[in-house]
Image (spheres, rainbow, N blue to C red):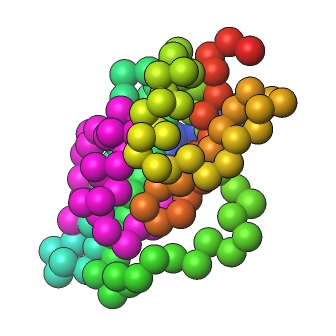
Amino acid sequence: MKFKMVHENFNVSDLDASLAFYEKALGLTECRRKTAEDGSFIIVYLSNECSSFELELTWLAEHPQKYDLGEEEFHLAFHTDDFEAAHELHESMGCIAFENHDMGIYFITDPDGYWLEIIPEKR
């Protein structure tokens, strides 16, 4: 029996802000969307040409505030083929949360505070 990872879900408080962030910061764009008939939720799947893995963003009408992410001891990681350019972009966006120079990586945060690790393609 084999299993393939398909997607990761993040609940978001402002879907438009999150969509704009993920497109600008990581080049992820909407590939499909599900909207509840009663307007209670919207689910948007994001991806890019580098992987079949998707990020699922879920917006709930009855939860407009940011989510309590606890101690934030989780993250989603991304390889980049141009680490310096990525770092420059993320620095200009003001979203770098932590840098580990010894490991050669850094983390950015999205509008809801989710941590995203940026890793050079070759270390």
Q: How many marks?
A: 0
Left or right, 1 with reference to 84: right
- Residue in front for this viewpoint, 106 or 16: 106
Quarter of the image with the C terminus is: top right
Q: Which residue: 53% across, 63% down?
A: 113
Outermost right residue: 102
Q: Is residue 31 visible?
A: yes
Above or below residue 62? Residue 80 is above
Residue 21's x, y, as percent?
35, 49
Left or right, 9 with reference to 14: right
Above or below residue 24? Residue 104 is above
Q: Is residue 54 visible?
A: no
Q: Quadrant of residue 30?
A: top left
Above or below residue 22? Residue 111 is below
Q: Is residue 20 magenta?
A: yes
Quarter of the image with the N terminus is: top right
Above or below residue 80? Residue 36 is below
Q: Which residue: 33% across, 87% down?
A: 62
Residue 12's x, y, as percent?
41, 67
- Magenta stretch in the rendered image: 8-35
Left or right, 17 with reference to 12: left
Left or right, 20 with reference to 8: left
Outermost bottom residue: 62
Residue 34's x, y, as percent?
25, 59
Q: Which residue: 56% across, 47% down?
A: 96
Q: Which residue: 77% across, 32% down?
A: 101
- Residue in front for this viewpoint, 37 or 110: 110
Residue 40's x, y, as percent?
26, 80
Q: Quadrant of residue 38?
A: bottom left
Q: Is residue 18 magenta?
A: yes
